[in-house]
Amino acid sequence: MLKVRIIPTLLYRDFELAKGIRFDSWRRIGGVVQAVRVYNMRMVDELIFLDITATLQKRDPNFQIVDDLADECFMPLTVGGGVRTIQDVQRLLQVGADKVAMNTAGIEFPELIKLVANKFGSQCAVVSIDVKKSPNGKYSVYTHSGTQSTDLDPIFVAKRAEEYGAGEILLCSIDRDGTMEGYDIELIQQVAQAISIPIIASGGAGNYEHMAQAVIEGGASAVAAGSIFQFTQQTPREAKLFLKEKGIPVRL
């Protein structure tokens, strides 16, 4: 088994970091460069940086802020938000991103995944899938920062992304996002059993046990988290030590 990664998520909204609940009720939580410096000191495995308003505002990715972040970031950096073209991906890689997350464009124009994988390699092609569960129990994929339903099944979207060359899936439960009530294990299980590429579980982490459940029960290869690190005293290193005690391989 590959070593499981602990990945803090930074959400960039209107020039500052923000954190919400179920993709709503946003609150500002400070500057992005300072956050990166803190995670540098904590020696986390990777960082995910998502500009959550770029697509809604029909903006290009913020190449300047990514350039600034990359200068401060000493761990692999995944960047998403506003990515629409192969040129966007190329420029993000040029200014310092290690991987590029495609959400709306990767779902509406899946050929983009193939173009990115063929030109830059699957290892930098991340497909971000945001999912809501309806009252009847059906999962549906949402785009445009969780505001538009596609009526697509997340298993179908994940399998197509894998077929088109994606290196991994960032799978986020909108229902669990920011709640700290635990990951949607059923969702993670369903997608993990359908594909062979790694899944980064996102949405709902409130304690270290939740992370262990996402890996052991859900089959995730990595766990992304925001609120647990921003609003509690829990740390990425303590998370790794907990997972290690559970027999989960981590990088210490």
Image (spheres, rainbow, N blue to C red):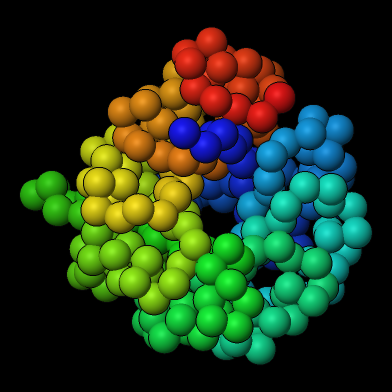
Where is residue 170? Give x, y as percent.
Answer: 47, 54
**Quarter occupied by residue 237:** top right
Where is residue 76? Give x, y as percent.
Answer: 72, 52
Where is residue 215? Give x, y as percent.
Answer: 41, 31
**Quarter occupied by residue 152:** bottom left
Where is residue 214? Give x, y as percent.
Answer: 39, 32
In this orientation, which residue lies closer to the viewer: 64 or 86? 86
**Measured along the vertical axis of the image, is residue 164 above or below residue 239?**
below
Q: Which residue is drawn at 64% across and 64% down?
A: 99
Q: Can residue 169 be seen in this view?
A: yes
Q: Can residue 180 be seen in this view?
A: no
* Residue at far left of view: 136
**Image-based side of 204 in relation to 98, left or right:** left
**Measured along the vertical axis of the image, is residue 30 above or below residue 158?**
above
Q: In which quarter of the image is the C terminus?
A: top right
Q: Which residue is drawn at 53% across and 10% down?
A: 245
**Image-based side of 203 in relation to 242, left or right:** left
* Residue at far front of view: 1
In this orientation, which residue lies closer to the viewer: 20 or 51? 51
In this orientation, which residue lies closer to the viewer: 18 or 129? 129
**Measured along the vertical axis of the image, is residue 225 above or below residue 142?**
above
In this orientation, which residue lies closer to the viewer: 57 or 64? 64
Q: Which residue is drawn at 39% across and 81% down?
A: 110
